[in-house]
Image: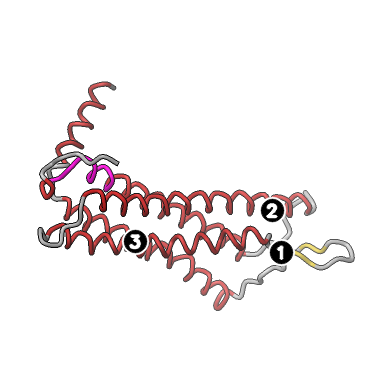
Amino acid sequence: MKTFIQNTLATLRGLTHHSLAKSFSRLGWTGFWIQIIIGSIPILLMVYTLTFAQSPTGPRAGLPIVEYLTTGVLAFLIFTTIWFFRYTRLAKRIADPARRPSENRLARSVWIGLTASSLAILSIILVMFIEVAHLLFYFLSAPQGGVPVFQTTGNGPASWVSAVDMLSLLAMVMTLFAELIVMMFSLWLLFRVTEGSPEYGGGKVEI
């Protein structure tokens, strides 16, 4: 185990001699397109379900806090997508000695992206926890001989769990997956910036 850790650290140190501009460009474009693709899949599934599958949308009322958190998640996803596109612009500036930003400024930029990803992940976990607990309440309220698609409760209004509810959870899971990848990319870029690079003479940065 000790040998494995030492080899891993040696490999990481060796990677710090590679171009920082290429790291920002490669990870910036990769993170950008991952978020674009993963973010578009739930939207396409939702459009297909509502337009072609003709799945009913149940009247299960969502909690207001879930709506606020979901809006926040979407805002964070849009922000981190734009921020990773910004990394690709920073890569061109790093490669140009006349326009090269300072290492401290690069570190602050990566910290902003890392903070946004962390807040997005926290919001997604809260949304999934609340939604799963809410769905569990509906399933426990249903007859336990099976899970009916439609449920009517006495003289009250009808309520049911539909495919749209599952799609919302799927969207949260996929967004969580994208934000975790984005967080790993941000951590690696932060490591690269603080460990130094050929463009900056290989010196470490204090943050």
* Residue that label 3 marks: 83
Residue 53 sits inside the magenta stretch: no
First to last magenta residue range: 189-197
Mark 1 Cα within 10 Å, few/some/many (few <14, many 20+)? some
Residue at 22% over, 55% down: 24
Q: Which marked residue is nearer to the observer: mark 3 or mark 1?
A: 3
Q: Which mark is residue 184?
A: none
Is 86 in front, or is 141?
86
- Give whichever of discs 3 and 1 has the lower sequence position: 1
Residue at 64% over, 51% down: 130
Q: Residue furthest bottom?
A: 51
* Residue that label 2 marks: 134
Quadrant where the N terminus lies? top left
Q: Which marked residue is nearer to the observer: mark 2 or mark 3?
A: 3
Residue 14 sits in which quadrant?
A: top left
Residue at mark 3 to residue at mark 1: CA–CA distance: 35 Å
Q: Main secondary structure of the magenta part?
A: helix
Residue 55 sits in which quadrant?
A: bottom right
* Residue that label 1 marks: 60
Location of residue 25 in the rendering, given as x and y in whole percent from the top left corner = 21, 58
Residue at 13% over, 47% down: 200
Is 29 in front, or is 85?
85
Residue at mark 2 to residue at mark 1: CA–CA distance: 10 Å
Q: Is residue 6 left or right of residue 149?
A: left
Residue at 17% over, 36% down: 13
- Badge 3 marks a residue whose secondary structure is helix
Residue 142 sits in which quadrant?
A: bottom right
Do callouts 2 and 3 mark residues in contact (Cβ within 8 Å)? no
Q: Which amino acid type is shown beneath numbered disc 2?
A: His
